[in-house]
Amino acid sequence: MSLTAFRSLGRSGLIVSPLALGTMTFGPGEWGADEANSRAVFDAYLEAGGNFIDTADIYSGGESEALVGKFIAERGVRDDVVLATKFAFNGSASPLTATQSGAGNPNAGGAGAKNICRALEASLRRLRTNHIDLYWMHIWDGVTPVAEIVQTLGDLVRAGKIRYYGLSDMPAWLAMKAATIAAERCVPGPIAIQVEYSLVARDVEAEHFPAAREGGMGVMPWSPLAGGFLSGKYRRDDVKGKGRLSGANPFGDTKFTDRNWTIVETLEQVAAELGRPMAQVALAWTLARKGVGATLIGASKVSQLRSNIDAAGLRLEAAHLDRLNEVSAPPIGFSAGLTSPMIRRMVYGGYEVVGWGE
């Protein structure tokens, strides 16, 4: 179990482990881990050579950040880790009251300059540090101009409050626009995007992956196991009481489709042939995808973490990759179709031409 093969994140000098430790499970909650278990997971990740810790200001109401900050301080490893956190979701209202009209302060959420600075100062206090290595916009609010986001985050880089920044859960055009504005103004730009990506969630390949490649941004998948769906916990005829997807969860029952069950069956076959857990094979597939800078993994138990980390050393053979790619191939939409092999051969007189980064 080792994470000593590092990669650069996007077109930057930030060097990270291929698997980042997501800490959404740190702290109270339905899928949460108490302080002792959170500390054990944190320690096991560092001892395996990992250096990339990802949290957010809303995880467990700020408790995740507080625990991460405490663990880092107690181990004295602040300079050894790449510490990432996020802003955007409202900090003045709970998820339940936030759906009600007038609940909370609207300027305590979003990607405007006022909230970014407020959220950052609060995160710095909880994390017990004077800077964030990678600051994520957790989600685009649909309102704030891209130029304001780039200006504010770039100013924070120059002020030394953050070292780099990235964009999570946003349209591909927004990420590309942010990268373009930054390049044209010669100011710090985003180095990565964070999106849902797995064998059963490949729709971002059409727009987000090309945008990331063109803008020099690494892709950081979240939920690479689709909320546990790709771990083998679920069966087509029995999806109750097995794990996170069985009760209230962000995905609902959207993963339980005929197409996805077919993908799981192929994944199970490949895993059996390799003698490896399904989760490891699903993670290894994600790590092998071009453009992926690091993949988020979460765990509430040390045994789960160690099994996932073992995926970093798994190299899938071409035949296995081909089977997984074929069964999980997303529908070819308009954008992807424009650069299909058939169209490209028509453009280049019947010749196959491979573009940069492909």
Image: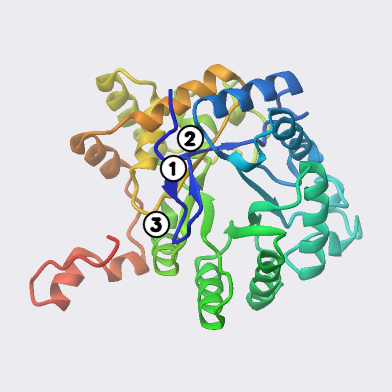
Tell me the crowding category of disc 1: few under 14, some 14 to 19, or many 20 or more residues within 10 angstroms, Cα based. many
Q: CA distance from mark 3 to mark 1?
A: 11 Å
The residue furthest bottom is: 184
Q: Is residue 59 above or below residue 278?
A: below
Location of residue 312 (image quadrant)? top left
Q: Position of residue 143 (x, y in %)?
A: 71, 72
**Label located before the other in sequence (1 or 2):** 1
The residue that label 2 is drawn on is 225
SS state under label 2: loop
The residue furthest left is: 350
**Label located before the other in sequence (2 or 3):** 3
Q: Residue at x 68, y 25 (%)?
A: 38
Q: Position of residue 183 (x, y in %)?
A: 51, 77
SS state under label 1: loop
Which quadrant, please, contains the N terminus? top left
Location of residue 266 (image quadrant)? top left
Pick the front one: 353 or 344: 353
The residue that label 3 is drawn on is 205
Pick the front one: 349 or 12: 12
Which quadrant, please, contains the C terminus? bottom left
Q: Are marks 1 and 2 in contact (CB under 8 Å)?
A: yes
The residue that label 1 is drawn on is 198
**Total of numbered circles in the picture?**
3
SS state under label 3: helix
Q: Amino acid at mark 2?
A: Leu
Q: Amino acid at mark 3?
A: Glu
